[in-house]
Image (tube, rainbow, N blue to C red):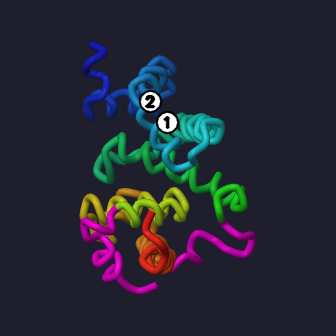
Amino acid sequence: MAINQLNTPADLAEMLSRTSQGDRQAFERLYQATSAKLFGLALRILASRDLAEEALQDAFVKIWHSADTYQTDKAAVMTWMTAIVRNRCLDLLRAAPKEHGLNEDESFDDWASDDLGPMEAAASQSDTKALMQCMQQLAPLQRQAFALSYFHGLAHEQLASQLAQPLGTVKTWLRRGLETLKNCMGHQAGGSVK
């Protein structure tokens, strides 16, 4: 199989199918074809090289053990593997909430308000820089949800699918994150311009 063909969906599906039968060479090729992209995802979510490496290793162990559960009619191979990596990253974020900006008594589902109206208002061209600075206050997955919603126009259902999270969780991230952004933007508008 040529290197430039390793990332085609059909090749990935074949590698995963062989992996499900215990083919270690197929698993190694699957790892070589996908690990760089999946590591990049983990690094964006976790913002720590060590944690991203841990998440990737754990995810590939799960992929090896769960390859036989993959269903071609449910998702593409890369989508399925991305969900495993994201879920592992979430687990790591939940395991160390203080390191990632959460208080002990907070959870990812405790961040919410009701609509995205103020987000759209804050997105005017003159406020974009301030908005980007304010978004740094959000947790990595919450920030990713906002970026996908704002920059790519994804609806709640699309975000849930893209992030491999329940719809309610995504809505909660957006609602509570919106409150944080609203407060930050209010302080930016009320503060001195730098």
**Amino acid type at mark 1:** Phe
Q: Residues within 10 Å of mark 2 (few under 14, many from 20)?
A: few
Q: Is residue 100 left or right of residue 6?
A: right
Q: Residues within 10 Å of mark 1 (few under 14, many from 20)?
A: many
Q: Amino acid at mark 2?
A: Ala
Instruction: Give coordinates of residue 188: x percent, y percent.
Output: 46, 73
- Disc 1: which residue: 39
* Residue at screen point 27% across, 34% down: 9
Whether residue 102 is situated above or below residue 86 in the rendered picture: below
Q: Quadrant of residue 70?
A: top left
Residue 106 part of the magenta segment: yes
Residue at x 52% of width, y 41% of height? 43
Q: Residue at x 47, y 72 (%)?
A: 192
Which residue has dot 2 on it? 36
Where residue 88 sits: x, y (%)? Answer: 58, 49
Q: Quadrant of the C terminus?
A: bottom left
Dots 2, 1 in contact, CB < 8 A: yes
- Please identify the residue farthest to the bottom as the structure is shown: 114
Identify which residue, 148 or 24, lies in the foreground. Answer: 148
- Label 2 vs label 1: CA separation? 5 Å
**In-front residue for pair 24/153:** 153
Q: Nearer the viewer, residue 90 or 16?
A: 90
Q: Which mark is residue 65?
A: none
Magenta part of the chain: 102-128
Can residue 12 be seen in this snapshot?
Answer: yes
Secondary structure, mark 1, is helix
Residue 69, placed above or below residue 104: above
